[in-house]
Every structure is written in structure tokens, then in C-alpha cells.
Image (spheres, rainbow, N blue to C red):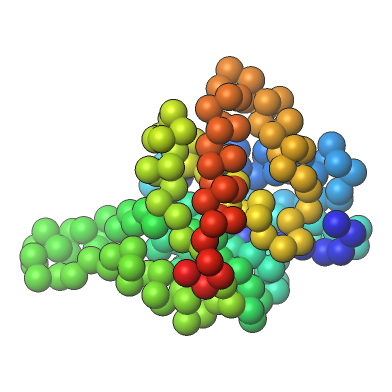
Amino acid sequence: MNGEWSVLICGVGGQGIVLFSRVLGTACASSGVNVVTGEQHGLSQRSGTVSIHFRTGPGISSPLIPAGTAECLAGLEALEALRYIEYLKPGGSVFTSTLVMHPVTRTAEREKDPSVAFATADDVVSRLKTLAGEVTALDARSIAVRSGNIQSENMVMLGALSSAGGFPVTAEAVEASIAELVPSAADVNIEAFRAGRAHSSRTPAGS
């Protein structure tokens, strides 16, 4: 892939978003693809918002994605995917987990008033479909569990993202990167990556 390609990766602290970026970045480097990234953390690393700007292409120098220009958005948590939707270009693709982790402030409101409604995964995905060209939603946690390790949700979502048009490297390059960076758990993470990729390829456009 010789052109420019950008993805905004987002979720909450503790989901392995940095490893997601490292695996993809290492795969790009080993494949001769120019890549720049920039991390942005929230007030709390664990359970706080985390986003990574990931850009590839020969002319890329700045790590930050201008609003409205990312080809893809990868959300490891549904509400965070919606939070960062402004970075997606018109007609761009969203790959999101259906996991919803409600903010502490919203939970506190509900503790005081049980009638306060929580947004569901269906609510968030429906909203995303009105804002993106294509939305692929996966129950990444369940897929990770079936693959052998709940902590491999990040690799499930990377697998899903790898089916996107313009994805800068081959699946084989990503798998080699996983083996290099997490050798003690390579098998389960590669299995999760393959499961996410297979699920995404079976998902009809816009569903």
C-alpha cells in the first residue's frame, strides 16, 4: 500500500491499546511502510480515555490526524468510538467492540436516580451508523474468550481492522509482529487476531 492511510484507535485504559498500536507499527516497519503515531491519554490511565493517532504513507510527518480525515476508526469500547467519531472522514469505516463501559459520572448519577438510562451497545452502534460510511461491530470480548484469553480483545479488534480497505500490511506481517512482541502468548493472540479478521470478513457492510 503506497498511499496515505490513517486510523484513530481508541478505548479506555487497560484494554491494551498501546500494544495494538505497537503490533501494527512493528508490522509496518518490517514491511517498509513509513508510520508515525501519537498517543493521547486521559486523566486516568486505567479506565480513562485513551486514543492513538496512527498514520502511514511516504509523505506523513505529523503524528496527529486532522479531524475528518481518518480512513478508519477502531474502537475497543463503543462509547469511546462515538466520542472520537469526529476524526473519521465522510464515508469512512468504523470497527468497534460492542463493549460499553459507562463513565463514573454517569454511574454516580444512576446510583442517585435509578431512572437514569444507560446507553446500550445497540444505541451506540445505531448512532455510529448515522455518522459513518460503514460500521462493523463485534462482541470482541466473547470472541477473545473463545480464542483462549479475554485479554486478547485488542488483537480481535486488530484482526477486524485488518480487513479494511487500504490496510497497510499483510495479515502475515501482523502475525509475525505479534510473535515478536508477545512471544509468551503468541499463539492465543494470533488466534484472536485471526478470529477478529474472520468475523469482520463475514460481517455485511454497514451491519
Residue visible at 55% across and 76% down?
132
How many numbered discs, if any?
A: 0
Question: Can residue 184 be seen by looking at this rendering?
Answer: yes
Residue visible at 67% across and 39% down?
22
Q: Position of residue 129 (x, y in %)?
A: 47, 76
Q: Is residue 154 left or right of residue 164?
A: left
Question: Can residue 55 be seen by looking at this rendering?
Answer: no
| 33, above or below 190, in the image | below
Q: Position of residue 80 (x, y in %)?
A: 45, 61
Quarter of the N terminus within the rendering: bottom right
Residue visible at 77% across and 45% down?
170
Nearer to us in this view, 8 or 49: 8
Residue visible at 46% across and 61% down?
137
Q: Position of residue 9 (x, y in %)?
A: 58, 55
Q: Is residue 124 left or right of residue 35?
A: left
Nearer to us in this view, 111 or 27: 27
Q: Position of residue 67 (x, y in %)?
A: 65, 74
Q: In which quarter of the view is residue 193 placed?
A: top right
Q: Farthest residue in the top direction?
A: 184
| 172, above or below 89, in the image | above
Nearer to us in this view, 205 or 11: 205
Q: Is residue 99 left or right of residue 81?
A: left
